[in-house]
Amino acid sequence: MGVTLFDTARRGLFEIDAGPVVTLYSCGITPYDAAHLGHAQVYLTFDILQRRLRDLGHDTRCVRNVTDVDDDILRKARELGVHYLDLAAEQIAVFDAQMESLGLLPMYSEPRATSAISEILSLIGATIDRGAAYEAGGAVYFDVTTFPSFGSVSHYGEAEMLALASEHGGNPTDPLKRNPLDFVLWQPSLPDEPSWESTWGPGRPGWHIECSALALRELGETIDVHGGGRDLVFPHHECEAAQSETVTQQPFVRHWLHVGLVALEGTKMSKSLGNLVFVDDLLQRADAAALRIAMMDHHYRTDWEWNDRDLAEGIVRRDQWRSATAGDGSAGLEAVRACLDNDLDTPGALRAIDAAAAQGLSVVAAAALLGVSLER
Ligand SMILES: [Zn+2]
């Protein structure tokens, strides 16, 4: 038996059916501002999954892209009066340091969107060759009517898709579109924006195409586990699947993994609302062990609200685990494995470690499987 996980597209629990090497792709950040706890929860989920897969004897290759060209980073660079790639370089360094401080396993690769312009251009060309995309006004749009299973990742109805497309800048009323849900593969750049030459005129990639191009380049035509925050299900992942499968004629993803959203005071954390809790602030107040425990007390699929009490409880638990020293260190390990195999039940895993530590037994190995070091 291996790890069973909820799959968004199949809407149920399925065992990850993978060979010796498991490929994973988690959608990364746009590096224009500090990473908040919602991002960290996504990458922590992929981290724990990788740790259990390695514990089961698999090799894992986890890619996390960097969206270093999009509306947000260009706007912020304009505001600050800096080059967008300088802003990206600075923020990537900050983000990588934070993820390392949180004890995340190093990525297999962290490719940037701007590293893949040639792959993006050939992917768009192949989509047009298949009759699934069209050119209009210097832009290229994917024609969703050519992909009958559009909607099979999110299972949203048309009204819901249209609402989400509007909310995420999809511009359904764009008069150049044949269908309101068609999405941009290539777009003309504004005069002060970066621009690359293409058959369809100078411009820059749309939002979704970079992840298809990078996933295909780094991991091949079919990824074992792909995901990110649940707000990426539509339009981002739905569009990625449509354009990728149109070109490769292969399943793009075996298992879709989506992580619940973290709120603060009842509102989803988002950069635009400014209601953010930052990983580096929390790591000033507690170590990675305590913070990981606080985050893992929330199952990855639930939406939850950050409360400072969580961090205080994480510290108490970490200290209880540290003070239990009897035995060979393996107490709780099998119970933690069983919890993780059951849809990454980290709250259950924490309780199993609590129970073993309450008997005074050392839980070093079980904690290590969760990436929690009990060394002082
Ligand atoms: Zn993505």
Image: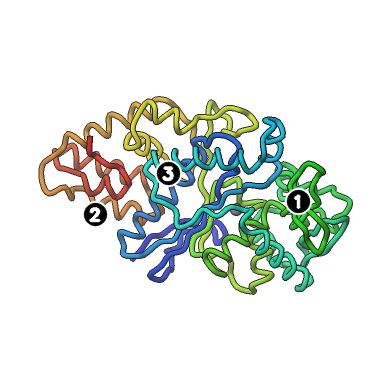
Circle 2 sits on which residue? Answer: 334
| Residue 26 in picture, x, y percent from top left | 52, 53
Checking the image for residue 347, the label placed there is none
All told, the count of numbered labels is 3
Spatial distance from mark 2 to mark 3, Cα to Cα?
19 Å
The secondary structure type at the circle numbered 2 is helix
Residue 20 visible: yes
Q: Position of residue 235 (x, y in %)?
A: 67, 52
Q: CA distance from mark 1 to mark 3?
A: 42 Å
Task: Name the residue carrying label 1.
Answer: 195
**Residue 309 found in image quarter:** top left
Of the numbered discs 2 and 3, the one sitting upstream in the chain is 3
Residue at image location 43% in from the left, 68% down from the top:
17
Quadrant of the image for the N terminus? bottom left
> Depth check: 309 or 118 in front?
118
Amino acid at the residue labelled 1: Ser
Lateral position of residue 62 relative to residue 31, left or right: left
- Reading the chain from its start, which is encountered first: label 1 or label 2? 1
